[in-house]
Image (cartoon, grey):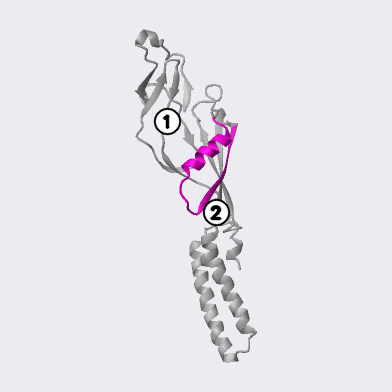
């Protein structure tokens, strides 16, 4: 966070060429920021800010936060999810405080990809920034929304779920139309049913829950 306070300025030549100082965050006013989608988080212990001689304040406080996100899993495991991170300050209307992003979405995208080091289930694909004003009962407030797009990596689900299911059904068709006796076909059909039941149990455990539209792979 960066902001300016015209009352906190000085001439470095009058103070041994000191152009900046480090002060506790409670020594001066700082803009209160809220994340609307936040459900849980862990704040950092960095309780200091940098004050420049021209009245520029800089405060960097990294913290870990858990957000709510509405998932659309109809195309699971080949789905792409979009989540919002909205930053607002409802204590000050736009007449007192307006939030702006210093970097462009392309610069933020590059930085975010460098921070996203894990090679897990999700692939970070896009980041866009929306700056707008929101009207509430008490007035109009400045808000900034970061739209984050993530693409699921389907390799694990293809190897552990889709390929075994296709192999079972192909084997079922081969035995059904093969020259085997009726008793052998019945025994093999029972084995196929048991195998399909086990895959259904595995599928039920790994599928994300959704109350709106279940994934297509879970309806067959």
Q: Position of residue 109 (x, y in %)?
A: 55, 39
The magenta stretch is 103-131
The image shows residue 63, relative to residue 54, as above or below, that is: below
Q: Does 126 lie within the magenta span?
A: yes
Q: Position of residue 140 (x, y in %)?
A: 58, 28
Quarter of the image that includes the C terminus: bottom right
The disc label shown at residue 101, or none: none
The image shows residue 69, relative to residue 60, as above or below, that is: below
Question: Which residue sits at x=60%, y=83%?
Answer: 175
Question: Which residue sits at x=56%, y=68%?
Answer: 163
Q: What residue sits right under mark 1 in the picture?
A: 60
The disc label shown at residue 152, or none: 2
Q: Is residue 14 left or right of residue 137?
A: left
**Considering depth in this image, is 218 or 160 the residue closer to the camera?**
160
**Considering depth in this image, is 67 or 44 the residue closer to the camera?**
44
Q: Does 45 lie within the magenta span?
A: no
The image shows residue 99, relative to residue 56, as above or below, that is: below
Q: Is residue 47 left or right of residue 79?
A: left
Q: Residues within 10 Å of mark 2 (few under 14, many from 20)?
A: some
């Amino acid at each position: 966070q960066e902001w300016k306070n015209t009352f906190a300025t000085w001439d470095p030549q009058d103070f041994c060429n000191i152009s900046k100082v480090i002060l506790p965050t409670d020594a001066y006013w700082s803009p209160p920021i809220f994340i609307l989608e936040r459900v849980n988080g862990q704040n950092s212990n960095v309780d200091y800010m940098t004050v420049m001689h021209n009245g520029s304040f800089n405060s960097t406080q990294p913290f870990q936060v858990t957000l709510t996100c509405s998932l659309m899993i109809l195309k699971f495991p080949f789905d792409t999810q979009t989540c919002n991170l909205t930053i607002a300050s409802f204590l000050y209307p736009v007449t007192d405080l307006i939030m702006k992003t210093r970097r462009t979405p392309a610069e933020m995208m590059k930085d975010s990809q460098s921070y996203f080091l894990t090679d897990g289930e999700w692939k970070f694909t896009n980041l866009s920034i929306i700056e707008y004003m929101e009207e509430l009962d008490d007035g109009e407030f400045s808000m900034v929304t970061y739209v984050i797009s993530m693409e699921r990596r389907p390799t694990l689900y293809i190897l552990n779920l889709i390929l075994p299911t296709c192999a079972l059904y192909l084997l079922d068709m081969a035995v059904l139309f093969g020259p085997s006796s009726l008793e052998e076909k019945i025994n093999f059909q029972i084995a196929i049913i048991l195998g399909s039941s086990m895959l259904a149990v595995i599928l039920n455990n790994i599928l994300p829950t959704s109350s709106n539209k279940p994934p297509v792979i879970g309806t067959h």
